[in-house]
Image: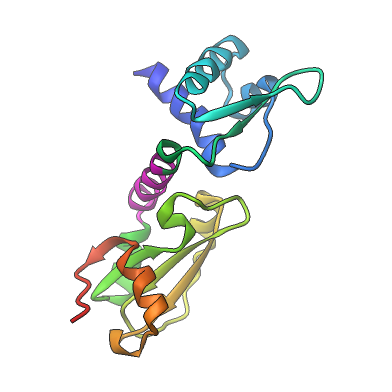
């Protein structure tokens, strides 16, 4: 159990910063885990092709394998899990009483980077809301898109929403 949790913490760094090159000592400091444990987990992640290893400098560096479909799937599932466990969905549901909440865009495909935002569609009237607490916890800016009537959306956006991840409610297109 603890091994799986420490591996998750390590993988979390690659999820949050997929374009960053990490060295073993830096990862060890960031997740507060012994270097030997970090090394063992990195070997496992390399075997699964979830990360890549490069020898640019004196010491090897490791980076997320953003082209790996399993990495994208795990990254997306991790974001969905974090959104749920942080209570963001419940918070939005309570504030807006929407018909549905949908995660769409790069985050819904597991392709978001450290510079990307989390796009959420809320089928409701727009209200001002402070999401700084959730933005800090997710390490991402949160962009909310409001529209009470689906018929007012353009086809491209509607297509993105259909291909997104429903977090709450029922999305009725027709």
Compare residues 121 and 43 and report the one nearer the observer.
43
Compare residues 96 and 71 and report the one nearer the observer.
71
Residue 107 rendering spot, x and y as whole percentages: 46, 56
* Residue at screen point 52% across, 41% down: 67
Vertical placement of residue 85 versus 59, above or below: below
Residue 16 rendering spot, x and y as whole percentages: 55, 43
Compare residues 128 and 71 and report the one nearer the observer.
71
Q: Which part of the image, by quadrant, shows the C terminus?
A: bottom left
> Is residue 84 magenta-colored?
yes
Query: Could you tell whether 41 is left or right of 164 in the image?
Result: right
Magenta region? 73-87
Q: Which part of the image, by quadrant, shows the N terminus?
A: top left
* Residue at screen point 46% across, 22% down: 6
Query: Could you tell whether 168 is left or right of 27 in the image?
Result: left
Label the magenta part by its dominant secondary structure.
helix
Residue 7 rendering spot, x and y as whole percentages: 46, 23
């Amino acid at each position: 159990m603890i091994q799986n949790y420490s591996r998750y913490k390590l993988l979390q760094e690659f999820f949050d910063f997929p374009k960053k090159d990490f060295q073993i000592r830096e990862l060890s400091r960031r997740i507060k885990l012994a270097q030997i444990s970090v090394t063992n987990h990195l070997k496992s992640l390399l075997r699964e092709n979830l990360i890549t290893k490069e020898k640019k400098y004196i010491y090897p560096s490791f980076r997320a394998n953003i082209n790996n479909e399993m990495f994208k799937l795990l990254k997306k599932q991790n974001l969905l899990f974090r959104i749920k466990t942080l209570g963001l969905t419940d918070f939005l549901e309570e504030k807006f009483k929407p018909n549905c909440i949908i995660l769409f865009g790069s985050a819904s495909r597991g392709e978001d980077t450290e510079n990307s935002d989390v796009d959420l569609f809320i089928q409701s009237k727009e209200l001002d809301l402070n999401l700084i607490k959730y933005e800090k916890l997710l390490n991402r800016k949160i962009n909310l898109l409001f529209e009470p009537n689906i018929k007012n959306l353009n086809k491209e956006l509607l297509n993105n929403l259909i291909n997104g991840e429903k977090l709450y409610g029922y999305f009725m297109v027709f």
